[in-house]
Image (tube, rainbow, N blue to C red):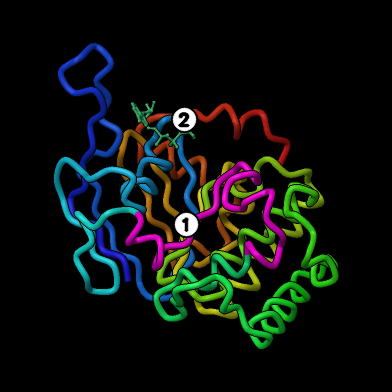
Amino acid sequence: MLELRNISKTFNPGTVNEKKALNGLSVTLEDGDFVTIVGSNGAGKSTLFNAVAGDFYPDQGSIRLDGRNITYLPAYRRSRQIGRLFQDPMRGTAPHMTIEENLALAYLRTAKHQRAFFSRVSKADKEFFRTQLARLDMGLEDRMRQPVGLLSGGQRQALTLLMSTMVPPKLLLLDEHTAALDPGTAEKVLSLTKEIVSREHLTCMMITHNMKNALELGNRTFMMDSGRIVLDLKGEERKGLTVEDLLERFRTGAGKALDNDRILLSND
Ligand SMILES: Nc1ncnc2c1ncn2[C@@H]1O[C@H](COP(=O)(O)OP(=O)(O)OP(=O)(O)O)[C@@H](O)[C@H]1O
């Protein structure tokens, strides 16, 4: 589904601030892979997502999505096939528009349902939105005419998740999408994530600083350091691993201890 070949990206080349954020990274994701990603501070996790989403073009290497070379495809054209959630629940939704209008925008802009005018949201579309919202189990189906700005962070993040997956994307990128939520809400949004990814059979990558989540969710875990994937754990090798095992494997793979202040500060 996703094939990255020898991707490199250096920021501020030739200056004192030069930083090699991605360093010849190669990996292939199979259809339906749900990969959790952990790593040290500045390992290149978000940069990897930025490269895949097309926020910049890599200095070298190639990116293929579902067999198509998208290395130099502009971000706005990839966004129809790649869903993305960020840590900040305020990103991804328009606060002054209603829940229904936000859903309609997300729905109508996808290739399959692309229609010229917003006014063409049909009664059937609205009913579809209502059913989808009810699945979130947050009562949002009864608040469809309310502006999104009135929702809590967790409700907004759940809505963004719905907007990104209502028409299943080829790839879903989750960049610490529950890190800014309180523990109870984070758990709820994570369980929704699990449910949607499994129901829609999505191919998904999720960056997390929660090592337990990294092992419990998905079928595969990448550990990143210095712009590379130093460990790619799946199948039997991944089963039964504890957080301590994971830290030890990282130490062996990267030749140093995992250095991430968010992991160290979290009580998870
Ligand atoms: N646009 C940019 N300009 C300059 N440097 C950048 C840019 N984006 C990222 N970097 C640098 O590239 C390196 C990788 O950053 P990235 O945000 O991908 O790390 P990360 O693994 O997501 O880290 P963290 O867990 O700390 O969020 C860091 O040293 C960062 O400062």
The residue at which mark 1 appears reads as 173
Query: Where's residue 68, x and y in %?
Result: 22, 70
Residue 210 visible: yes
Binning the other alpha carbons within 10 Å of mark 2 as few (below 14), some (14 to 19) or many (20 upward) gives some
Left or right of 264? Residue 80 is: left
Amino acid marked by disc 2: Asn
- Which residue is located at x 34 percent, y 66 percent? 29
Which secondary structure, mark 2? loop
Q: Nearer the viewer, residue 116 or 101?
A: 116
The magenta region covers 76-102
Q: Measured along the vertical axis of the image, is residue 2 above or below residue 199?
A: above
Badge 1 crowding class, 10 Å Cα cut-off, few under 14, some 14 to 19, many 20 or more, is many
Q: Is residue 106 above or below residue 91?
A: below
- Which kind of residue does numbered mark 1 sit on? Leu
Q: Is residue 246 magenta?
A: no
- Label 2 within 8 A of ligand 1 by Cβ: yes
Of the four image quadrants, the one with ligand 1 is top left
Q: Residue at x 34, y 61 (%)?
A: 78
Q: CA distance from mark 1 to mark 2?
A: 19 Å
Residue linked to disc 2: 41
Q: Is residue 118 left or right of residue 139?
A: left
Quadrant location of residue 65? bottom left
Q: Residue at x 18, y 50 (%)?
A: 6
| Rendered residue at 77%/67% (across/down) | 144
Q: Is residue 122 above or below residue 223?
A: below
